[in-house]
Each structure stands twice: as C-alpha cells, then as structure tokens.
Amino acid sequence: MIMTNGFDIRRLGECKFESSLDNAVIIDEAAGVLLDATVHGGAGVPDDMPVMEMAGPRQHIFFNPKDVNAAIVTCGGLCPGLNDVIRGLVMVLRHRYGVRNTFGIRYGYEGMIPSCGHDMMCLDTNLVADIHKDGGTILGSSRGGQSVPESVDFLVDNGITMLFTIGGDGTQRGALDLTNEIAKRNLGISVIGVPKTIDNDVAFTQRTFGFETAVAMSQPSITAAHNEAN
C-alpha cells in the first residue's frame, strides 16, 4: 500500500477473500490520485512523465486577431451541443479577441473540396445568437475521408489561418493529417480539434459535450423497454 501523507485509510486487517464482482474495473492497491495534478503542484516530476498542456488563455498569442480568418467545421454524427460550441467559438473570437471573420465550412470535410459544391457560410454574431436553442448543427455534417492536399489547398486559397474541427476520433485523425500536411508545407495555419462524441469514447477526455444530454434522453426509452420486458 502506498503512503498518502495522512490520507491513507485504515484497514480492519488483511484482505484474504476473492471478490465476486464480474466485469469490474479492479483497482490496484498501489494506485492513487494526486492531490494536485498540475505540473507546478507535483514535487519532483520526472522529465519523462507524460504531461498534457493545460488549456486556457495565454498572455501572448501568435496571430494578430485583426488578420485572422477563422473557420469551423462539424463532422460525423449529430451530438447535443454542436450549435452551442459553434456559437461559443464565434462569440469569443469576435467579442473577446476581436476576430472579424469567422466562416462555417458546410457538410464536414466535404466542404473543403471545391468539386462538392458547398460554399462557406459567414458566421457573424447575429446569425449564431440563438442557434444554441436548436438541435443538430447549423453547418451540416458528413462522414468519410477527403483528399488532404486538396483540403489544405482550400484553406490556403481562402486565406484561412485558424481551423476548428468539431468531431470524434475520425474527425480528429483527419485534423492530424491536415496538421501534418500544413507542417510539411511550412504554412502558418493553426488546427484546433474539439472532441465530440455521445459515446464518451475519445481517448484522454474525461467527458465530452453532449454526453450527459444523450444519456438523460435515452433513459426514459430504456426504462420503458425494461418495464415492458419485465
């Protein structure tokens, strides 16, 4: 048992019997939770310890906001809260940072392929003011992979400097492919992935938007089916 600096729990004695729980996540006796999980709070954090960068505003930013052309794309299945995220991005970019131009890419990554014929939307604060009251996504969505070089060409041709990709694991894999292509060309385009899944199955995220709503909405149907079965 690990020492926990005063937080250790006293045991009645040695635990000798096997638990009868099936399909349970068994916690090792040596497992523990850091009281302060931040790097600054940790004492003597090893150099090789995996550390994720903490999200949040920074004192200094790369882009001059007045020169930014931001774009938002939603991909994959629908999820509660998509319009909330779109609205939040547009509002914060405009009112907090002063970004003048934010565009919506229509119907997922298809919207970055000119031959698909989907024009971008201009997302201003008046347009998105009430979209959080509606389900779905104002931008539309789609599945399937598109040409990465052609997609990056689209970003360059339209002067996009900041791309927000809202979607699940497939969408974020696509965002990584875009990032690699952008880096290969040495372009000044930032790609920001926003994880989205009603299954809550995106690695390294404790909880994604829309998950609690999906669970709450499914409960009455499951309860009704359970009662019917009984």
Image (spheres, grey):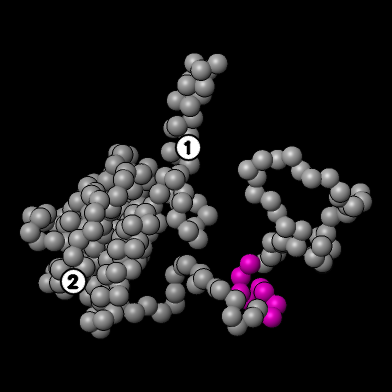
Residue 5 image point, x, y percent:
82, 67
6 and 230: which is toward the camera: 230
Task: Please say if 76 is above or below 151.
Answer: above
Which mark is first along the chain, 2 or 1? 2
Q: Secondary structure at mark 2?
A: helix
Mark linked to residue 179: none
Distance CA(mark 1)–CA(mark 2): 38 Å
Q: Can see residue 202?
A: yes
163 vs 28: above or below: below
Which quadrant does the C terminus fall into?
top right
The prevailing secondary structure element of the residues shown in magenta is loop
Front in this rendered view, residue 128 or 118: 118
Residue 149 - label? 2
Magenta-highlighted residues: 37-44
Left or right: where 161 falls relative to 33: left
In this rendering, position of residue 130 left or right of residue 228: left
Pick the front one: 134 or 201: 201
Identified at 44% across, 39% down, the residue is 213
